[in-house]
Every structure is written in C-alpha cells, then in structure tokens.
Image (cartoon, helix red, strand yellow):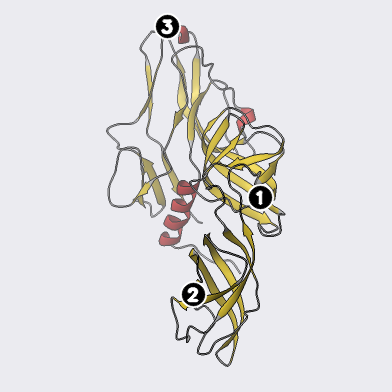
C-alpha cells in the first residue's frame, strides 16, 4: 500500500531539503537532455577565466512572503509544494566580461556538497565548522547511516557550504566549533541507578551537575524507570552517578543515572575519517529555451530559482 503525501507534507519535505542542502548555481555549455541519471560529471561548466562565477544560495527558508536571499516556500497554483529563492523582481544575475565573448551557455545547474565519513567519534551538528589543515567548511546537515558516535563507528554523509580548499583522505577531520575540554556526556548508561517513581515512557529530564544534559525515559515498570537514553550531552560533567530534575511528566525527581564516559577534548582531536574531497550532488538542471552566445562585454543572464515538490 502506498500513502499519499498531502500538500503540507510536500511543504515540510521541501523545507527540510532546502534548510539542510545549500545550493550552488552554475552555468553549463554542453547541450544535454536532463533525465534521472544525469550528474554534475555530465555537464561542462563554463570556464571561469572571465566574469563568470558560481552563485551560492543561502539555506534559509521563510513562509510568509518573498524575501531577499531566502527560499520562500508555499503551495503554488497547481497545488505543489514550491520554493522560490529571493524576490521575483531581483533574480540571480551573471554578468560577463570581454574574456567571456564567444562562450555559449546551454543552461543552469545547481548542486550541493556532500562529504562521506566513517569512524565518527564526536557528534557533528548543523552549524559546526569542520577543518582539515587549511581547508574549512560549514555543516548544513548530517545523515547518520550506520554506527553510533559513542561507539566510534558512526558513518554517513555531511552536507556542507562555504567550503574553501579540497579535503583529502585521512582521519584528520576536526571540529573547530567544539570548545576545548567540554566534558560533554558521551555515554549515559541505559539502566538507571535509581528508578524513582511516577515516571512514564517519553518523560524528559535534566541531568545532574553539568549544563545542558538532557535524557529521556525509554522503559518503565509500574512507574519505576528501567531504561533511559541520552538526548543532549551538555558540558561540564564528570563520570559519576547524577541526580535528575524532570522536564515533563509526573516523576518524583528521585531518578538517578550513571554517566559512563565523556568527550573531553575539542578541536585538536580528529572526529571522523574521510576518503577524500566532498562531491557535488546535482539538484537542479534547467536548459535554456535556446543556447545563449556571449557576444558583448557586459552581457547578462538572469535566473529566478524555483523548485517544486510534487507527489503523483
């Protein structure tokens, strides 16, 4: 049985994609007929020896009205979830110089940067800045495909923006956003030390003497907690039995939990292993109605990015 995604579902899926995948626009010169198998490798990007340069779009979303440098997400006249970047009166513009004369533009494409990783040791979050030597990039999204951070075998994909330079293979990726010696909780023992009373599955609680640690009740027996999980590691903790304070539910605040291990080092410690540089994942291809030949200095091409999400 297949479920139908209603309009609101289309909007939420589109918002999630635009928030976590920063799109970079470019121009290509070879004639292509887009299909589902097309990748960035199948496009010949315009040479950058003149005025042409890629345009980076922000991964910001609004829902009330068009706004400069943001995706306006709404339901269009056809009932599709639709995102328009920027204001219709101010499309993205490429302006060419004399060095571009003679070039031919066949269309516009958009991609996002994806960096696969393995052996992830510390949780990577949206907004973190990752570094490898002089190479830096900002994280827009993380997909954990297998393993766990606590186990040191987390693996998946990191979505990036504002990358400068090229990453190389090795266990040398560090997170410069993480303060040195945070003492963040790495592992919270599943079995509590004292189960308290009056708790229910799903109840949230603040952990002990540090700052920002939050856990959740995952199993109870007659109101007594039998299992918990870690939601946020916080900072400034020690490996010890920790008291808790309920955030939600009817527990008696007698629940105590065991912090088993900590993250104690920051940006000097490698947080994951990578196999090489990030790859460009093709998200948008829009051929021009006819090839556009650059014939004069100052010639322009404008483009209003619009992405639609539709279920059939």
- What is the x, y in percent for residue 256? 56, 79
Residue 218 in picture, x, y percent from top left? 59, 78
- Whole-number angstrom distance, CA of label 2 to CA of label 3: 64 Å
Instruction: Name the disc covering residue 205, or none.
Output: 2
Residue at 61% across / 49% down in the picture? 265
Q: Name the residue under label 1.
A: 156
Please report contact status of discs 2 and 3: CB closer than 8 Å, yes or no. Answer: no
Dot 2 or dot 3, earlier in sequence: 3
Whole-angstrom CA distance, mark 1 to mark 2, is: 29 Å
Q: Residues within 10 Å of mark 1 (few under 14, many from 20)?
A: some
User: Considering only order in the chain, which callout, 1 or 3, is on the residue closer to the N terminus?
Assistant: 3
Assess disc 3: are there few (<14), some (14-19) or many (≥20) residues with their C-alpha within 10 Å of its C-alpha: some
What whole-number distance in Å separates the C-alpha atoms at marks 3 and 1? 44 Å
Residue for point 46% across, 27% down: 288
Query: Element type at marker 1?
Result: strand
Give the number of the disc on residue 98.
3
SS at badge 2:
strand
Using the image as rendered, state which of residue 252 and residue 248 is in the foreground: 252
Q: Toward which corner of the image does residue 190 lie, by quadrant?
A: bottom right
Is disc 1 in contact with disc 2, using a CB cutoff of under 8 Å?
no
In terms of depth relative to the viewer, which is nearer, 226 or 108? 226
| 239, above or below 61, in the image | below
Instruction: Please tell me which residue is depicted at 64% across the width and 32% down the height of the picture.
Output: 167
> Which residue is at 62% across, 66% downward?
239
How busy is the neighbourhood of tag 2: few (under 14 within 10 Å), some, or many (20 plus)? many
Q: Where is residue 155 in the image (x, y as percent from the top left)?
A: 68, 51
- Count numbered badges in the picture: 3
């Amino acid at each position: 049985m297949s479920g139908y995604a209603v309009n609101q579902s289309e909007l939420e899926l589109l918002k999630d994609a635009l928030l976590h995948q920063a799109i970079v626009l470019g121009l290509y010169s070879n004639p292509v007929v887009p299909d589902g198998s097309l990748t960035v490798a199948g496009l010949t990007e315009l040479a950058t020896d003149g005025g042409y340069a890629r345009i980076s779009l922000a991964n910001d979303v609004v829902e009330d009205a068009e706004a400069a440098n943001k995706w306006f997400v709404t339901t269009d006249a056809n009932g599709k979830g639709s995102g328009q970047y920027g204001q219709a009166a101010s499309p993205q513009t490429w302006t060419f110089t004399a060095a571009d004369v003679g070039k031919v533009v066949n269309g516009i494409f958009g991609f996002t940067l994806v960096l696969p990783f393995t052996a992830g040791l510390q949780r990577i979050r949206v907004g973190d800045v990752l570094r490898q030597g002089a190479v830096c990039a900002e994280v827009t999204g993380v997909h954990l495909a297998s393993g766990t951070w606590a186990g040191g075998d987390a693996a998946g994909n990191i979505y990036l923006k504002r990358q400068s330079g090229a990453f190389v293979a090795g266990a040398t990726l560090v997170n410069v956003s993480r303060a040195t010696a945070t003492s963040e909780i790495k592992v919270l023992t599943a079995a509590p030390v004292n189960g308290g009373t009056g708790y229910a599955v799903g109840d949230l609680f603040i952990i002990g003497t540090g700052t920002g640690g939050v856990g959740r009740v995952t199993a109870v027996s007659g109101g007594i907690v039998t299992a918990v999980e870690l939601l946020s590691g916080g900072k400034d903790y020690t490996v010890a039995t920790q008291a808790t304070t309920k955030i939600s539910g009817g527990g008696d605040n007698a629940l105590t939990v065991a912090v088993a291990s900590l993250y104690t080092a920051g940006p000097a410690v490698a947080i994951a292993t990578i196999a090489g540089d990030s790859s460009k994942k093709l998200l948008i291809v829009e051929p021009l109605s006819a090839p556009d030949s650059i014939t004069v200095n100052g010639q322009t091409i404008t483009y209003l990015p619009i992405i639609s999400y539709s279920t059939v």
